[in-house]
Amino acid sequence: MPRFDDAGGILTIDLGAIIRNYEALRERAPGAEVAAVVKADAYGLGMAEVARALEAAGCRTFYVATVDEGAELRRVLPTAEIAVFNGVLAGSEMDFAEHRLIPVLNDLGQIDRWAAFARGWDEMPAILHVDTGMNRLGLPPHEAEALAAMPERLDGMRVRCVISHLACADDPEAEMNRRQLDLFRAITARLPRRPRGLAASGGIFLGPEYHFDQVRPGIALYGVAPDPGRPNPMAPVVHLAGRILQVRDVDSPMAVGYGATHRVTRPSRIATVAVGYADGYVRSLSNQGRCFIGDVPVPVVGRVSMDSITLDVSGVAETEALPGMTVEVIGPHRPVDDLAREAGTIGYEILTGLGRRFFRRYVGGPA
Ligand SMILES: *Cc1c(COP(=O)(O)O)cnc(C)c1O
Protein backbone atom coordinates (compact mmCIF):
# COMPACT_ATOMS: atom_id res chain seq x y z
CA MET A 1 0.00 0.00 0.00
CA PRO A 2 1.31 3.51 -0.77
CA ARG A 3 1.92 6.06 1.96
CA PHE A 4 -0.93 8.50 2.45
CA ASP A 5 1.08 11.37 0.96
CA ASP A 6 2.03 9.39 -2.15
CA ALA A 7 -1.38 7.89 -2.81
CA GLY A 8 -3.35 8.85 -5.91
CA GLY A 9 -6.53 7.74 -4.21
CA ILE A 10 -7.57 7.52 -0.58
CA LEU A 11 -10.19 4.85 0.03
CA THR A 12 -12.02 5.01 3.34
CA ILE A 13 -14.15 2.04 4.38
CA ASP A 14 -16.58 2.63 7.23
CA LEU A 15 -16.80 -0.62 9.18
CA GLY A 16 -19.24 1.06 11.57
CA ALA A 17 -21.62 1.62 8.65
CA ILE A 18 -21.27 -2.06 7.66
CA ILE A 19 -22.22 -3.03 11.21
CA ARG A 20 -25.19 -0.65 11.18
CA ASN A 21 -26.30 -2.14 7.89
CA TYR A 22 -25.99 -5.63 9.36
CA GLU A 23 -28.16 -4.59 12.30
CA ALA A 24 -30.70 -2.89 10.02
CA LEU A 25 -31.03 -6.10 7.98
CA ARG A 26 -31.46 -8.08 11.17
CA GLU A 27 -34.37 -5.82 12.07
CA ARG A 28 -35.84 -6.30 8.59
CA ALA A 29 -35.72 -10.08 8.91
CA PRO A 30 -36.31 -10.61 12.62
CA GLY A 31 -37.08 -14.33 12.46
CA ALA A 32 -34.09 -15.28 10.32
CA GLU A 33 -30.39 -15.75 10.85
CA VAL A 34 -28.50 -13.06 8.91
CA ALA A 35 -25.46 -14.64 7.27
CA ALA A 36 -22.97 -12.41 5.44
CA VAL A 37 -21.65 -12.84 1.91
CA VAL A 38 -17.97 -11.81 1.84
CA LYS A 39 -16.88 -13.35 -1.48
CA ALA A 40 -14.50 -11.48 -3.81
CA ASP A 41 -12.64 -9.89 -0.88
CA ALA A 42 -15.93 -8.68 0.61
CA TYR A 43 -16.89 -7.06 -2.70
CA GLY A 44 -13.48 -5.41 -2.88
CA LEU A 45 -13.61 -3.85 0.58
CA GLY A 46 -11.25 -6.26 2.38
CA MET A 47 -12.52 -9.63 3.58
CA ALA A 48 -10.48 -9.83 6.78
CA GLU A 49 -11.44 -6.40 8.12
CA VAL A 50 -15.08 -6.71 7.07
CA ALA A 51 -15.53 -10.24 8.41
CA ARG A 52 -13.97 -9.38 11.77
CA ALA A 53 -16.34 -6.42 12.13
CA LEU A 54 -19.35 -8.53 11.20
CA GLU A 55 -18.39 -11.28 13.60
CA ALA A 56 -18.09 -8.71 16.38
CA ALA A 57 -21.62 -7.58 15.45
CA GLY A 58 -22.89 -11.12 16.00
CA CYS A 59 -22.67 -12.71 12.55
CA ARG A 60 -21.92 -16.44 12.73
CA THR A 61 -22.24 -17.66 9.14
CA PHE A 62 -20.22 -16.39 6.18
CA TYR A 63 -20.47 -17.26 2.51
CA VAL A 64 -17.54 -17.08 0.07
CA ALA A 65 -17.33 -18.25 -3.54
CA THR A 66 -14.16 -20.32 -3.60
CA VAL A 67 -12.19 -22.74 -1.42
CA ASP A 68 -9.26 -20.30 -1.46
CA GLU A 69 -11.41 -17.52 -0.08
CA GLY A 70 -12.72 -19.93 2.54
CA ALA A 71 -9.23 -20.97 3.64
CA GLU A 72 -8.20 -17.33 3.91
CA LEU A 73 -11.29 -16.47 5.93
CA ARG A 74 -10.70 -19.44 8.24
CA ARG A 75 -7.37 -17.90 9.27
CA VAL A 76 -9.26 -14.74 10.31
CA LEU A 77 -12.29 -16.40 11.93
CA PRO A 78 -11.32 -19.62 13.70
CA THR A 79 -14.83 -20.51 14.86
CA ALA A 80 -17.30 -19.09 12.31
CA GLU A 81 -19.31 -21.23 9.88
CA ILE A 82 -17.88 -20.69 6.40
CA ALA A 83 -19.77 -21.91 3.34
CA VAL A 84 -18.44 -22.06 -0.22
CA PHE A 85 -20.92 -21.28 -3.03
CA ASN A 86 -18.97 -23.07 -5.76
CA GLY A 87 -19.30 -26.38 -3.95
CA VAL A 88 -16.97 -29.32 -3.87
CA LEU A 89 -15.03 -30.13 -7.04
CA ALA A 90 -13.31 -33.47 -7.54
CA GLY A 91 -10.07 -33.47 -5.56
CA SER A 92 -10.95 -30.58 -3.25
CA GLU A 93 -12.71 -32.62 -0.54
CA MET A 94 -9.69 -32.61 1.79
CA ASP A 95 -9.40 -28.81 1.54
CA PHE A 96 -12.93 -28.52 2.89
CA ALA A 97 -12.11 -30.83 5.77
CA GLU A 98 -8.77 -29.20 6.55
CA HIS A 99 -10.19 -25.66 6.74
CA ARG A 100 -13.57 -26.79 8.12
CA LEU A 101 -15.47 -25.31 5.19
CA ILE A 102 -19.05 -26.17 4.30
CA PRO A 103 -19.68 -26.92 0.63
CA VAL A 104 -22.82 -25.59 -1.02
CA LEU A 105 -23.76 -28.70 -3.01
CA ASN A 106 -25.06 -27.68 -6.42
CA ASP A 107 -25.84 -30.94 -8.18
CA LEU A 108 -26.16 -34.68 -7.60
CA GLY A 109 -22.54 -35.17 -8.62
CA GLN A 110 -21.40 -32.88 -5.81
CA ILE A 111 -23.83 -34.57 -3.40
CA ASP A 112 -22.53 -38.06 -4.18
CA ARG A 113 -18.93 -36.87 -4.02
CA TRP A 114 -19.43 -35.25 -0.62
CA ALA A 115 -21.43 -38.22 0.68
CA ALA A 116 -18.67 -40.63 -0.37
CA PHE A 117 -16.08 -38.47 1.37
CA ALA A 118 -18.29 -37.94 4.43
CA ARG A 119 -18.54 -41.68 5.04
CA GLY A 120 -14.99 -41.69 6.40
CA TRP A 121 -15.84 -38.94 8.87
CA ASP A 122 -18.31 -38.13 11.54
CA GLU A 123 -21.21 -36.17 9.97
CA MET A 124 -19.79 -33.65 7.49
CA PRO A 125 -21.76 -30.41 7.17
CA ALA A 126 -23.28 -29.32 3.86
CA ILE A 127 -25.68 -26.81 2.38
CA LEU A 128 -27.98 -27.83 -0.46
CA HIS A 129 -28.65 -25.42 -3.28
CA VAL A 130 -31.77 -26.06 -5.38
CA ASP A 131 -32.30 -24.08 -8.56
CA THR A 132 -35.69 -22.38 -8.85
CA GLY A 133 -35.16 -20.53 -12.12
CA MET A 134 -31.79 -18.85 -12.13
CA ASN A 135 -30.27 -21.65 -14.24
CA ARG A 136 -26.80 -20.88 -12.98
CA LEU A 137 -26.02 -23.08 -9.97
CA GLY A 138 -28.08 -25.46 -7.89
CA LEU A 139 -29.89 -28.77 -8.40
CA PRO A 140 -32.19 -28.49 -11.41
CA PRO A 141 -35.78 -29.59 -10.63
CA HIS A 142 -35.34 -33.16 -11.95
CA GLU A 143 -32.28 -33.66 -9.75
CA ALA A 144 -34.13 -32.28 -6.72
CA GLU A 145 -36.89 -34.77 -7.57
CA ALA A 146 -34.38 -37.62 -7.73
CA LEU A 147 -32.97 -36.59 -4.37
CA ALA A 148 -36.45 -36.42 -2.85
CA ALA A 149 -36.98 -40.01 -4.01
CA MET A 150 -33.63 -41.15 -2.56
CA PRO A 151 -32.86 -38.99 0.49
CA GLU A 152 -30.35 -41.61 1.66
CA ARG A 153 -27.94 -40.04 -0.83
CA LEU A 154 -27.43 -37.47 1.93
CA ASP A 155 -26.38 -40.11 4.48
CA GLY A 156 -23.25 -39.17 6.38
CA MET A 157 -23.71 -35.44 6.02
CA ARG A 158 -25.48 -32.94 8.17
CA VAL A 159 -27.48 -30.60 5.92
CA ARG A 160 -27.40 -27.21 7.63
CA CYS A 161 -29.62 -25.36 5.23
CA VAL A 162 -31.39 -25.66 1.87
CA ILE A 163 -30.97 -22.54 -0.23
CA SER A 164 -32.04 -21.10 -3.56
CA HIS A 165 -31.27 -17.80 -5.27
CA LEU A 166 -33.61 -15.20 -6.79
CA ALA A 167 -32.96 -13.90 -10.29
CA CYS A 168 -34.94 -10.63 -10.09
CA ALA A 169 -34.93 -9.68 -6.40
CA ASP A 170 -33.79 -6.13 -7.20
CA ASP A 171 -37.17 -5.59 -8.90
CA PRO A 172 -40.10 -6.00 -6.50
CA GLU A 173 -42.54 -5.90 -9.45
CA ALA A 174 -41.01 -8.89 -11.22
CA GLU A 175 -43.42 -11.84 -11.38
CA MET A 176 -40.49 -14.20 -11.33
CA ASN A 177 -39.97 -13.56 -7.59
CA ARG A 178 -43.31 -15.14 -6.70
CA ARG A 179 -42.77 -18.05 -9.08
CA GLN A 180 -39.39 -18.82 -7.52
CA LEU A 181 -40.88 -18.51 -4.03
CA ASP A 182 -43.65 -21.00 -4.85
CA LEU A 183 -41.24 -23.42 -6.47
CA PHE A 184 -38.83 -23.18 -3.53
CA ARG A 185 -41.65 -24.05 -1.15
CA ALA A 186 -42.76 -26.97 -3.30
CA ILE A 187 -39.26 -28.43 -3.72
CA THR A 188 -38.22 -28.06 -0.10
CA ALA A 189 -41.49 -29.64 1.06
CA ARG A 190 -40.36 -32.88 -0.59
CA LEU A 191 -36.81 -32.82 0.74
CA PRO A 192 -35.76 -33.70 4.30
CA ARG A 193 -36.94 -30.86 6.52
CA ARG A 194 -34.04 -28.46 7.15
CA PRO A 195 -33.67 -24.70 7.72
CA ARG A 196 -34.22 -22.79 4.49
CA GLY A 197 -32.79 -19.65 2.90
CA LEU A 198 -33.84 -17.80 -0.26
CA ALA A 199 -33.11 -14.10 0.13
CA ALA A 200 -29.94 -12.17 -0.65
CA SER A 201 -29.99 -8.36 -0.26
CA GLY A 202 -32.87 -7.71 -2.65
CA GLY A 203 -34.94 -10.61 -1.35
CA ILE A 204 -34.88 -9.28 2.20
CA PHE A 205 -36.81 -6.22 0.98
CA LEU A 206 -39.45 -8.31 -0.84
CA GLY A 207 -41.09 -9.01 2.51
CA PRO A 208 -41.25 -11.58 5.30
CA GLU A 209 -42.43 -14.49 3.12
CA TYR A 210 -39.04 -14.43 1.46
CA HIS A 211 -37.03 -14.60 4.69
CA PHE A 212 -37.44 -18.24 5.79
CA ASP A 213 -34.77 -19.26 8.36
CA GLN A 214 -31.66 -17.65 6.92
CA VAL A 215 -30.98 -14.63 4.71
CA ARG A 216 -27.59 -13.99 3.10
CA PRO A 217 -27.02 -10.39 2.05
CA GLY A 218 -23.87 -9.11 0.40
CA ILE A 219 -24.26 -5.80 -1.39
CA ALA A 220 -26.67 -4.19 1.10
CA LEU A 221 -24.09 -4.64 3.87
CA TYR A 222 -21.71 -2.59 1.75
CA GLY A 223 -24.12 0.32 1.42
CA VAL A 224 -25.35 -0.20 -2.13
CA ALA A 225 -29.10 0.03 -2.81
CA PRO A 226 -30.76 -3.43 -2.77
CA ASP A 227 -33.42 -2.01 -5.11
CA PRO A 228 -31.84 0.64 -7.35
CA GLY A 229 -35.30 1.96 -8.25
CA ARG A 230 -36.00 3.20 -4.72
CA PRO A 231 -34.31 5.46 -2.16
CA ASN A 232 -31.38 3.61 -0.64
CA PRO A 233 -32.15 2.49 2.94
CA MET A 234 -28.54 1.43 3.61
CA ALA A 235 -25.80 3.54 5.21
CA PRO A 236 -22.98 4.47 2.80
CA VAL A 237 -19.74 2.58 3.45
CA VAL A 238 -17.23 3.74 0.85
CA HIS A 239 -15.53 7.10 0.39
CA LEU A 240 -12.95 7.60 -2.34
CA ALA A 241 -10.90 10.77 -2.66
CA GLY A 242 -8.77 11.33 -5.76
CA ARG A 243 -5.56 13.34 -5.64
CA ILE A 244 -5.03 16.32 -7.93
CA LEU A 245 -1.65 15.97 -9.65
CA GLN A 246 -1.67 19.00 -11.90
CA VAL A 247 -3.89 21.92 -12.90
CA ARG A 248 -3.68 23.80 -16.18
CA ASP A 249 -5.46 26.53 -18.11
CA VAL A 250 -6.76 25.63 -21.56
CA ASP A 251 -8.71 27.45 -24.23
CA SER A 252 -10.18 26.87 -27.66
CA PRO A 253 -9.05 25.25 -29.95
CA MET A 254 -7.30 22.83 -27.56
CA ALA A 255 -8.47 19.30 -26.72
CA VAL A 256 -8.11 17.11 -23.64
CA GLY A 257 -6.96 13.51 -23.36
CA TYR A 258 -6.58 10.46 -25.62
CA GLY A 259 -8.42 10.72 -28.90
CA ALA A 260 -8.85 14.46 -28.27
CA THR A 261 -12.51 13.68 -27.56
CA HIS A 262 -13.05 16.77 -25.43
CA ARG A 263 -12.78 19.94 -27.51
CA VAL A 264 -12.29 23.03 -25.38
CA THR A 265 -14.75 25.77 -26.34
CA ARG A 266 -13.96 28.45 -23.74
CA PRO A 267 -11.23 29.35 -21.26
CA SER A 268 -11.24 26.52 -18.71
CA ARG A 269 -9.16 25.02 -15.94
CA ILE A 270 -8.41 21.32 -16.11
CA ALA A 271 -7.29 19.24 -13.10
CA THR A 272 -5.62 15.88 -13.62
CA VAL A 273 -6.57 13.43 -10.85
CA ALA A 274 -4.62 10.23 -10.15
CA VAL A 275 -7.48 7.72 -10.42
CA GLY A 276 -7.88 5.83 -13.70
CA TYR A 277 -9.44 2.72 -15.11
CA ALA A 278 -6.69 0.58 -13.57
CA ASP A 279 -8.10 1.78 -10.24
CA GLY A 280 -11.65 0.84 -11.15
CA TYR A 281 -12.77 4.19 -12.52
CA VAL A 282 -14.21 2.51 -15.56
CA ARG A 283 -13.51 3.88 -19.01
CA SER A 284 -17.21 4.22 -19.86
CA LEU A 285 -17.15 7.26 -17.53
CA SER A 286 -15.13 9.13 -20.19
CA ASN A 287 -16.91 12.45 -20.79
CA GLN A 288 -19.70 11.11 -18.50
CA GLY A 289 -18.54 10.93 -14.89
CA ARG A 290 -18.64 13.64 -12.29
CA CYS A 291 -16.58 14.26 -9.18
CA PHE A 292 -17.14 16.89 -6.52
CA ILE A 293 -15.06 19.60 -4.91
CA GLY A 294 -17.04 20.63 -1.88
CA ASP A 295 -20.60 20.95 -3.17
CA VAL A 296 -19.56 21.79 -6.72
CA PRO A 297 -19.77 19.10 -9.43
CA VAL A 298 -16.66 18.86 -11.60
CA PRO A 299 -17.26 16.85 -14.78
CA VAL A 300 -14.89 14.32 -16.28
CA VAL A 301 -13.75 15.74 -19.60
CA GLY A 302 -11.95 13.59 -22.14
CA ARG A 303 -11.25 9.90 -21.86
CA VAL A 304 -10.46 8.05 -18.66
CA SER A 305 -6.79 6.98 -18.80
CA MET A 306 -5.21 4.02 -17.03
CA ASP A 307 -3.84 6.13 -14.19
CA SER A 308 -5.79 9.37 -14.32
CA ILE A 309 -8.86 11.37 -15.24
CA THR A 310 -9.16 15.01 -16.27
CA LEU A 311 -11.80 17.20 -14.64
CA ASP A 312 -13.09 20.60 -15.65
CA VAL A 313 -12.65 22.59 -12.43
CA SER A 314 -13.50 25.99 -13.92
CA GLY A 315 -16.48 26.19 -11.55
CA VAL A 316 -14.46 26.22 -8.32
CA ALA A 317 -12.10 28.84 -6.90
CA GLU A 318 -8.47 28.38 -7.90
CA THR A 319 -7.50 27.87 -4.24
CA GLU A 320 -9.92 24.90 -3.99
CA ALA A 321 -8.27 22.90 -6.75
CA LEU A 322 -4.51 22.83 -6.31
CA PRO A 323 -2.03 19.98 -6.80
CA GLY A 324 -1.99 17.75 -3.69
CA MET A 325 -5.62 18.49 -2.82
CA THR A 326 -8.31 15.86 -3.32
CA VAL A 327 -11.68 15.60 -5.04
CA GLU A 328 -14.64 13.42 -4.04
CA VAL A 329 -14.83 10.48 -6.46
CA ILE A 330 -17.23 8.40 -4.31
CA GLY A 331 -18.92 9.90 -1.28
CA PRO A 332 -22.02 11.73 -0.07
CA HIS A 333 -22.39 13.70 -3.32
CA ARG A 334 -21.44 10.74 -5.50
CA PRO A 335 -22.89 7.50 -4.13
CA VAL A 336 -21.67 4.24 -5.66
CA ASP A 337 -25.09 3.74 -7.25
CA ASP A 338 -24.92 7.09 -9.09
CA LEU A 339 -21.43 6.39 -10.33
CA ALA A 340 -22.53 2.95 -11.50
CA ARG A 341 -25.53 4.35 -13.35
CA GLU A 342 -23.36 6.92 -15.15
CA ALA A 343 -20.93 4.16 -16.06
CA GLY A 344 -23.70 1.92 -17.41
CA THR A 345 -23.06 -0.78 -14.81
CA ILE A 346 -24.08 -1.79 -11.28
CA GLY A 347 -22.70 -0.96 -7.85
CA TYR A 348 -21.38 -4.53 -7.48
CA GLU A 349 -19.01 -4.06 -10.39
CA ILE A 350 -17.78 -0.67 -9.17
CA LEU A 351 -17.03 -2.01 -5.67
CA THR A 352 -15.34 -5.22 -6.78
CA GLY A 353 -13.30 -3.23 -9.30
CA LEU A 354 -11.88 -0.78 -6.74
CA GLY A 355 -8.15 -0.80 -7.33
CA ARG A 356 -5.30 -2.02 -5.21
CA ARG A 357 -3.25 1.16 -5.52
CA PHE A 358 -5.24 3.25 -3.07
CA PHE A 359 -4.22 4.22 0.43
CA ARG A 360 -6.87 2.30 2.37
CA ARG A 361 -8.12 3.16 5.78
CA TYR A 362 -10.76 1.55 7.92
CA VAL A 363 -12.83 3.62 10.31
CA GLY A 364 -15.54 2.84 12.84
CA GLY A 365 -14.54 -0.76 13.43
CA PRO A 366 -14.97 -2.81 16.60
CA ALA A 367 -12.62 -1.93 19.46
C1 LIG B 1 -23.42 -13.25 -4.33
C2 LIG B 1 -24.54 -14.07 -3.81
C3 LIG B 1 -25.33 -13.59 -2.75
C4 LIG B 1 -25.26 -12.18 -2.26
O1 LIG B 1 -26.02 -11.36 -3.12
P1 LIG B 1 -26.25 -9.81 -2.89
O2 LIG B 1 -27.12 -9.40 -4.00
O3 LIG B 1 -24.89 -9.17 -2.95
O4 LIG B 1 -26.88 -9.63 -1.56
C5 LIG B 1 -26.26 -14.48 -2.20
N1 LIG B 1 -26.42 -15.73 -2.69
C6 LIG B 1 -25.71 -16.19 -3.74
C7 LIG B 1 -25.96 -17.57 -4.24
C8 LIG B 1 -24.75 -15.38 -4.34
O5 LIG B 1 -24.05 -15.83 -5.39
Image (spheres, helix red, strand yellow):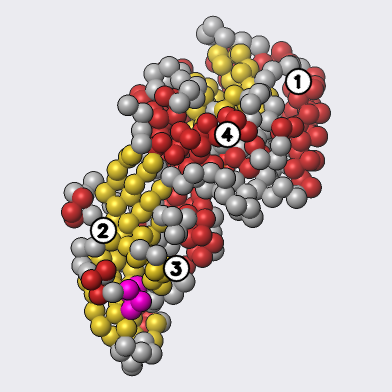
Let me know if residue 335 is in the magenta part. no
Q: Point out the tag, 4 or 1, that comes first from the N-terminus.
A: 4
Label for residue 191? 1
Residue 240 percent across, percent down from the top left:
36, 54
Q: Amino acid at mark 3?
A: Gly
Q: Is residue 192 left or right of residue 68?
A: right
* Disc 2/disc 1 C-alpha distance (Å): 54 Å
Q: Point out the tag, 4 or 3, that comes first from the N-terminus.
A: 4
* Disc 2/disc 4 C-alpha distance (Å): 34 Å
Tag 4–tag 3 contact (CB < 8 Å): no
Label for residue 25? 4
Label for residue 168? none
Residue at figure coordinates x 51%, y 52% from the top left: 347
Density class for disc 1 (Cα within 10 Å; few <14, some 14-19, many ≥20) is: some
Q: Amino acid at mark 2?
A: Gly
**Pointer 3: what residue?**
289
Q: Point out the tag, 2 or 1, that comes first from the N-terminus.
A: 2
**Pointer 2: what residue?**
8
Q: Amino acid at mark 1?
A: Leu
Q: Point out the tag, 2 or 4, that comes first from the N-terminus.
A: 2
* Disc 1/disc 3 C-alpha distance (Å): 50 Å
Residue 329 percent across, percent down from the top left:
38, 60
Residue at figure coordinates x 20%, y 63% from the top left: 324
Q: Which one is closest to the eye, mark 2 or mark 4?
A: 4
Density class for disc 3 (Cα within 10 Å; few <14, some 14-19, many ≥20) is: many
